[in-house]
Image (cartoon, helix red, strand yellow):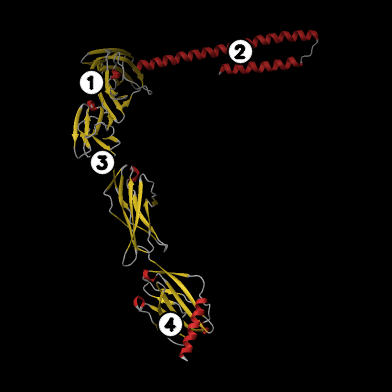
Amino acid sequence: MHLLSASCVCALLIAALLRQVSGLETVTGLYGETLEIPCNIGAIKAEDIIMTKWKYDKGEGLSGDLLVKQKNQNVSISATDEYKGRVSMAANSSLLLSAAKLSDQRTFTCMVVAAADITEYPVNVVIYKKPTNPEISDKAEELEIGKLTKLGTCVAEAANPAANITWLKNNKPLVADGRGISIQASVQVDPVTGLSTTSSVLEYSAGKEDTDAQFSCSTQHATGAELVSSPVIFTITYSTENMVLQVIAQEPLVEGDNVTLKCVADGNPAPTSFNFHLKGELVKVENADTYTITNVSRDTTGEYRCSLIDNATMQASKDITVKYLDINLSPSGKIVKKAGETLDLTLQIDASGDSKVSWTKDNVKLDKEPKFTKVTYSDSGRYECGVTMGVLSRKASFELVVEGAPVIKQLTKQRSEDGTHKVLICEAEGSPKPAVSWSINGTSLDESPFVNGKITHKIIVVPTANLTVSCTVSNEFGTDTRAINVSSLIEDVRKHISDDSDQTKMVVGVVVGLLVATVVIGLAYWVYMKKSKQGSWKTGEKENGSSEEEKKLEEKVEENSQKAEV
């Protein structure tokens, strides 16, 4: 019975070989995780399956059993060696393989025995492992412009399959060109784990534009993950190619200020010592890039240069201009002149640029520069000139005093409106201020302020008789006197009455003359009308019109007679 069964099983196995599923399915697993390897995939219904068995390819045509499950029985695990304790079966007959490792990359076969058939499902297993985060090692201390230098090595460890490495500059890929960029990659496999480590060496020829550039590397892997290293910035060294001389000073730079010269070079590392050329004098400055000139003067104006100590041809220059403004007004201070004399003014300006001049007299702006061909009392005052050039300004002044003997310009008299007194007015010029005196006593009415050598003095008098009054003005340079006739107030009244009487007589004469003329005209007209009547009687003409005219004439004559009587 057992022999028959064994022979039957052999026959079935031979038949199974003939019914092996064509094609080889591949399942990918992740290193260290549990891998599920499918079986049957629904080709045979579960109720028709009598037995399921999993085995693996040990190589050299040998296979090893893992587990078997018969219908209505528990799984029986027969795995040994590396798979002991790592395999189990899922409800759908899939093989569960824990802690996947690279040695699991082989073919696993699921054999399914049904009522009328035996079928095998071989599955190829591939194990992936993403690399560790890439890192840049063996970094260069600095990069020299134009020189191909090993920048560093990017390493991506423990991957399967081996990772590909790409170098980046500012997050953009670098591609080897055989000139300024060289990339060499290599892969090492760990003999124990079988995992691969990829190394990539970048040689790079830097330029000035690479200052502050960020270099990094990234890995690409079959798992789809992309990992990027931390960026690295390298010091770019290069010789000085450009220099600038800066002038640090307040604007505008004027005499007495300080000015600092600063030499700026673009080398990296930057030069720390310089030669400063100061108008023929050479000053060497070490461990500094500045030189200060104190208390500058107009003589400081000129060209200044700085250069490298180890390369005198590498230099920069700058012009310095010290602004200045000097004025000299002659004469100045207090100037005393006699009226009529000449005053010559001289204003000298020494400036580093164009300037503007303005004048004031007693703080009032003048339209032009004052000229004194013949000084007058009105020219007296304080004169100030202001000279400006940008923000610079200078002032100078003088005080002009015009002196001379006083002269009376006008002596006048006025009668008050009510006729009770008279006002005498004496106007004079002179300097210093002249004293004013009168030949009679009077009440002082007013004295004007002494301005521009002029003074006006007024007194009130009540003359009772005709008299001559004199005004005298005097100062330390001389005296002047002038007289005026002043009539008494009584005489003024008599004259006024006399003038009124003459005017009355003239009016009466005019009125009488008019009356006489009116009477004469009336008589002449009456005689004329008489004659006209006699003529009309003779001719027999009508007299109506003539009578009316005669009546009107008589009325007019009578009216004029009445006016004459009044």
**What number is the disc on residue 332?**
1
* Residue 304 position within the rendered picture, expressed as x and y whole percent measured from the top left: 25, 29
Q: Which mark is residue 68?
A: 4
Q: Are marks 3 and 2 in contact (CB under 8 Å)?
A: no
Q: Amino acid at mark 4?
A: Val
Q: Is residue 435 in view from this perspective?
A: no
- Secondary structure of residue under mark 1: loop
Kindly give the residue lying farthest to the bottom in the view shown.
1
Please tell me which of labels 4 and 2 falls first in the chain: 4
* Marked residue nearer the N-terminal end (1 or 2): 1
Q: Nearer the viewer's eye, disc 4 or disc 1?
A: 4
Identify the residue under disc 3: 270
Give the alpha-carbon distance from disc 3 to disc 1, as whole Å.
58 Å
- Asked whether residue 219 is in view, the answer is yes
**Going from the N terminus, do you reach mark 3 or mark 4 first?**
4
Pointer 2 residue = 518
Helix, strand or loop status at disc 4? strand
